Amino acid sequence: MACQLFGTDGIRGVANVFPMTAEFCFRLAQVLSSDVCVSTKRVAIGKDTRVSSYMLEAALTAGFTSMGVDVVKMGVVPTPLMTSQIQDLKVDMGVMITASHNPYFDNGIKLIGALGNKFSDERTAKIEAMLISDRKFISSSEAVGRVYKDKKSVLNYIDSILQIAPSEGALKGLRLVVDCANGAFSKIMPQVFKELGAGIITLADKPDGYNINENCGSQHTDFLSQVVIGSHADAGIAVDGDGDRLVVIDNKGNRIEGDQLIAFLATYLSIAKKLKNNAVVATVWSNIGLEKYLHALGLDFYRAPVGERYVIEKMRQTAACLGGEESGHIVLLDYARTGDGLIAAIVFCLALAEDGREASDIFPLFEKYPFKAGNIRFENFEKLSDVADAPQLAEVVASIEEKIKKEGSVIVRKSGTEPVLKVKVEAQDESTVFGAYARIVETINRLK
């Protein structure tokens, strides 16, 4: 069953507009109460700093408690903090209220299992079917849940992160500019880097409900780059609003691409004999240059569909401890259950300090294959599906794949969060790339 509400990373939309309404969240909580929260009858709720998160938290809390489920309020926390600490809370699941890197007027819901894993496609489809059904949920006056405040998870998370470094002050001598995106890491990230001995300049660490991701964070790094250059910093570190995405800026103000970060971390962990099974996982979107580089190191490389959840699934299948996406989701399963921008940043800084060279002298580690990528927007999801599933488009894509299959790739995929068709062509020859890309886009526009 294809989901209409849930995308690759939960539900997302404009706050106070369906489905990001109080009414919807109340019903979602009732559905989850009847289908998921049946063992301990406890649920954890966390949120990012956007103003609407408080409204949605209140609605979810009312829905859960009306069904006799106790709520543990974690407050403002990063998504990776919830995934790493949820087992200690002894709950049936967690609900994270966040729209990740989106602006403040959007919001979203991420569903986290009792062990810290995101829900599977099958379970999500079942929940959506119940949500859109006519089923009524009967509350009982004899079964009303309580609300508790979690006071330990943030401290436990910080303690566990500090253990990643081999010693106190492991980052002493490193000068960093840290951009907290006015999000959930605004208090935690500067504290951790200071305790590890780094000298830091902190940006975007004063959330007001409206400035999350506003000209800051992982999606807006121009100012971060300027500060890195002006302060002669070794690197700039930026996360997104809920902290599961990392972008790194080198000492000359250049963004280090996600694939290059994966290559660098793989090299570091491999040399340190910490790369389990000599395996690395990325997605079909990653550049072929990354694959060639890792193979040259004698490492196994696996691709997963786009989406952090699929990367983690492939990592577990291949016993890999490192995986990630070009977008900045870096997963280090020895330290975290999901992508964690702060943990990835710490491991990067440890590797940078050990290398001894300036970041601009290290990157790029490999030469990218020529590629062209873009997004084609549609009026709605229905029109998007009509074009994406059209046999004419499939024929064009198949003919291009046949031509470049030995040293290239073609991706045409629907976005999981918006009515957008993503197109990418990659090959050894640049003219082949641009010609194939133009042919695909022309076909899509003709079908629109």
Image (cartoon, rainbow, N blue to C red):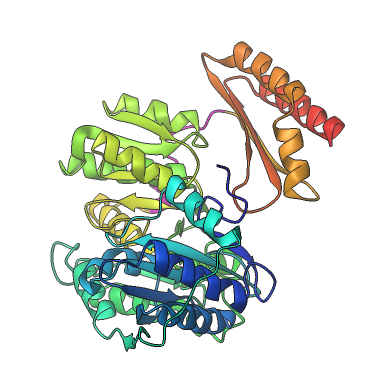
Q: Measured from the top left, where is residue 398 in percent x and y?
A: 65, 17
Q: Measured from the top left, where is residue 156 in percent x and y?
A: 21, 76
Q: Bounds of the magenta span?
A: 359-369
Q: Measured from the top left, where is residue 400 in percent x and y?
A: 66, 17
Residue sitting nearer the eye, 253 or 284: 284
* Picture residue at 61% right of the left edge, 12% below the top: 402
Residue sitting nearer the eye, 129 or 330: 129
Q: Is residue 345 above or below residue 376?
A: below
- Residue 362 is one of the magenta-drawn residues: yes
Q: Quadrant of residue 128?
A: bottom right
Q: Quadrant of the N terminus?
A: top right
* Picture residue at 31% right of the left edge, 40% below the top: 315
Residue farthest toward the right in the current orientation of the protein: 446
Q: Is residue 219 visible?
A: no
Q: Main secondary structure of the magenta part?
A: loop
Q: Is residue 124 visible?
A: yes
